[in-house]
């Protein structure tokens, strides 16, 4: 069986062709978002068509040899039928399976449709599939009303702590001056203009997470409190899924930049869940998409 996996994340598009043993025949990567809510459906269709055809040509594999296609796309949760029709127009002889991007990440990480995945990148979320095949998702509400424990949230909490310290409402630790240096500002009032600059992107605020994680690892008390709070929020996502899916000691995997590297956030979450080792994903999300199609 030859399958195609498609991973359309918020900042990149990956299309891979895999054998039934999960050997990757070719992987096509594009550093562009494939989120239809950002670039529109017509542009996503063009990107998908071009990427799939380039992947087939490079493998090389004929379209009629592709038995199934699995796709996980950010922003496509409300457009599942559109995505199925689009892929069917490209590969009319293939079985098409579509799921949220977090579900293909879970299947890839565990190598099966079972377990829990906790993600912390710019945002945060968690998802789970139990042994009855029931699935649930927790978090992922976006930076305005959720995403606690993600990079943007950690960055914003750091800015809030710095503002309180400027007032004298919180201790001025090394994190205070480190934040000023990172932002290249010199006076507390500059914090307002930096934060509320209409051109300020979420990514810029999320990048502050690297600063607070480093400070926390060095023992900074304010930074440690922020990171501890972030880890607790992620732990609550885990507990929510355990309760909703009636799990008993489920396998857990991590995803996202903040949990894929050796950070205090990762260590604290491992302790809270009671894991013995750092989770090591079996496959990538794009491979997870192909595996999802094979298992369906």
Image (cartoon, rainbow, N blue to C red):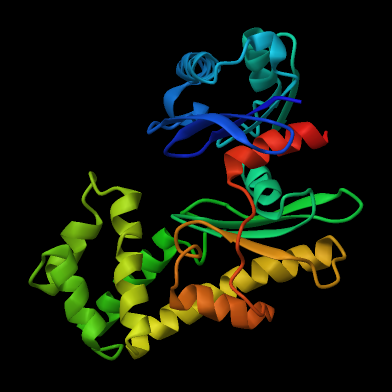
In the image: residue 34, left or right of residue 185: right
Quadrant where the image shows the C terminus = top right
The image shows residue 263, relative to residue 48, as above or below, that is below
Up the image or down, 222 lies above or below 260; here it is below
Residue at 50% over, 67% down: 149
Quarter-wise, where is residue 169 in the image? bottom left
Q: Position of residue 147 (x, y in %)?
A: 52, 58
Q: Is residue 64 above or below residue 187?
A: above
Instruction: State which quarter of the image contains the N terminus.
Output: top right
In the picture as drawn, the residue positioned furthest to the left comes out as: 186
Where residue 25 sits in the image (x, y, percent)?
A: 57, 29
Residue 100 visible, this angle: no
Q: Residue at x 42, y 61 (%)?
A: 151
| Residue 190 percent coordinates (x, y) | 13, 65
Residue at point 46% right, 19% down?
47
Nearest the eye: 192 or 148: 148
Judging depth in this view, the residue of 273 and 57 nearest the camera is 57
Looking at the picture, how far across and down is residue 256, in whole percent? 50, 56
5 or 271, which lies in front?
A: 5
Q: Residue at x 69, y 65 (%)?
A: 252
The mark tally for this picture is 0
Front-most of 50 and 44?
A: 50
Q: Residue furthest right?
A: 132
């Amino acid at each position: 069986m030859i399958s195609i996996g498609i991973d359309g994340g918020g900042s990149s598009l990956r299309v891979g062709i895999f054998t039934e043993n999960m050997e990757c025949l070719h992987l096509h990567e594009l550093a562009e978002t494939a989120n239809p809510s950002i670039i529109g459906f017509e542009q996503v269709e063009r990107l998908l068509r071009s990427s799939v055809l380039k992947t087939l040509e490079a493998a090389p594999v004929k379209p009629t040899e592709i038995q199934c296609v699995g796709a996980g796309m950010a922003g496509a949760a409300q457009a599942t039928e559109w995505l199925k029709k689009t892929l069917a127009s490209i590969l009319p002889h293939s079985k098409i399976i579509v799921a949220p991007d977090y579900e293909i990440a879970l299947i890839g990480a565990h190598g099966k449709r079972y377990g829990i995945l906790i993600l912390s990148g710019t945002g945060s979320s968690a998802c789970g599939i139990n042994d009855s095949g029931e699935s649930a998702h927790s978090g992922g509400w976006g930076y305005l009303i959720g995403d606690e424990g993600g990079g943007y949230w950690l960055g914003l909490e750091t800015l809030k702590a710095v503002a309180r310290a400027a007032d004298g409402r919180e201790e001025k630790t090394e994190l205070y001056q480190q934040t000023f240096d990172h932002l290249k500002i010199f006076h507390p009032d500059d914090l307002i203009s930096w934060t509320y600059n209409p051109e300020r992107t979420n990514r810029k605020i999320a990048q502050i997470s690297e600063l607070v994680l480093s400070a926390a690892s060095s023992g900074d008390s304010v930074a440690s409190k922020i990171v501890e709070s972030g880890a607790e929020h992620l732990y609550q996502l885990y507990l929510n899924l355990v309760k909703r899916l009636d799990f008993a000691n489920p396998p857990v995997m991590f995803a996202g930049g903040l949990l894929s590297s050796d950070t205090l956030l990762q260590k604290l979450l491992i302790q809270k869940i009671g894991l013995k080792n750092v989770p090591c994903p079996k496959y990538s999300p794009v491979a997870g998409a192909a595996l999802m199609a094979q298992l369906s």
